[in-house]
Image (cartoon, rainbow, N blue to C red):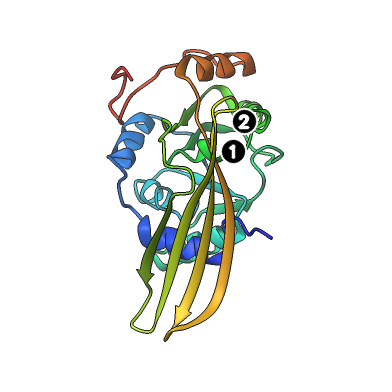
Amino acid sequence: MFKNYGPLCAAVYELTKPIGSELNGDITYYLERLEGRHGPILEAGVGTGRMLIPLLEEGFQVDGVDLSADMLEKCSQACHQRHLTANLIQADLATMALGNCYDTIIMPTASFSLLPSEETAYQVLTNFFDHLVPKGRLIIDLDLPFYPEIGEVSTTTYSIDKKTGITLEQKTLAIDWFHQHIVTYLKYEKWTEGSLIATELQDMTMRWYGLSEFKLMLEKVGFESITLSADYDYLAPP
C-alpha cells in the first residue's frame, strides 16, 4: 500500500533540499567537524546528495548509502552533472555489509529519527560501529519532538514546470508518548494540466530520543568520547 521514498518523494526532496543548501548551517558544521580527517567517509541516508556533493567538492572521499533507489538515482545524476565520482550504494542501514571501514560516518538531516523502532536504531548504531576504523568518528543529527494536532492536515504544492506539479498532503495520525514517536501519512500527487498522473502514499514514523537516553545507547554499542552540540554550534549545551 505504501511506497516510502519513491520517485515523487525524491522529486519533492530535490526541490525542497537542493544540492548544497544549508539547513540552519549544517553543512558548514559538518565541514568544520571533518577538518583534518583524511580517511574515507560514509554518508548514511545520502538522499539526493544535498550534503554529499559539497563534501566531494571540498576534496573529501565520500561514499553514500540509502535504501531508496529513487533518491540514489537523483544523487547519481547530480554527481554526473558536476563531473564528480561517488560510490553510491543501495542498502538497509541495519543489515548493510559494505566490506569497507570508514574513518567517519555521518547521518545528517535528522534522518536517524526516521528509523522506525528502538530495535532498528540499535541495529543501525551497531552496524555503524562495525563499519568504523579504530578511533573512527560518528556524527549524527537528532530532532527534538514537535507536537502537531492529531488529524491535522496540511497541503503544499510544488511546481516542476508550467504544466506539471506535485501536491503533498500531510496528516498526523498519532503521537505515542510511551514509544516516543509520531506517525504521519503523506500523500504525493503528480498533476499535469489538471490531470492526476501519479500518486504515492508514504507512512512516516518520526522518533525522538532523550539526550541522556541516546548517550546510553551509544555507550551500550561501544562508542566513547561522546559530545553533544546544539544548533550546529560545537559543544554548545542543548
- Secondary element under disc 1, as helix, strand or loop, is loop
* Quadrant of the image containing the C terminus: top left
Q: Is residue 38 left or right of residue 6?
A: left
- 32 in relation to 76, above or below: above
For disc 1, the marked residue is 115
What is the C-alpha distance between the residues marked 2 and 1?
Answer: 6 Å
Q: Earlier in the sequence, mark 2 or mark 1?
A: 1
Amino acid at pointer 2: Ala
For disc 2, the marked residue is 121
Choose between 49 and 197: the one closer to the eye: 197
Where residue 65 appears, x then y in whole percent? Answer: 58, 47
Tell me the residue at 40%/35% (across/down): 146
The dot on residue 45 is none
Tell me the residue at 37%/55% (across/down): 17
Choose between 210 and 196: the one closer to the eye: 196
Q: Is residue 46 visible?
A: no
Q: Dot 2 surroundings within 10 Å: few (below 14), some, or many (20 or more)?
A: some
Q: Is residue 12 left or right of residue 203?
A: left
Label 2–label 1 contact, CB within 8 A? yes
Q: Is residue 233 visible?
A: yes
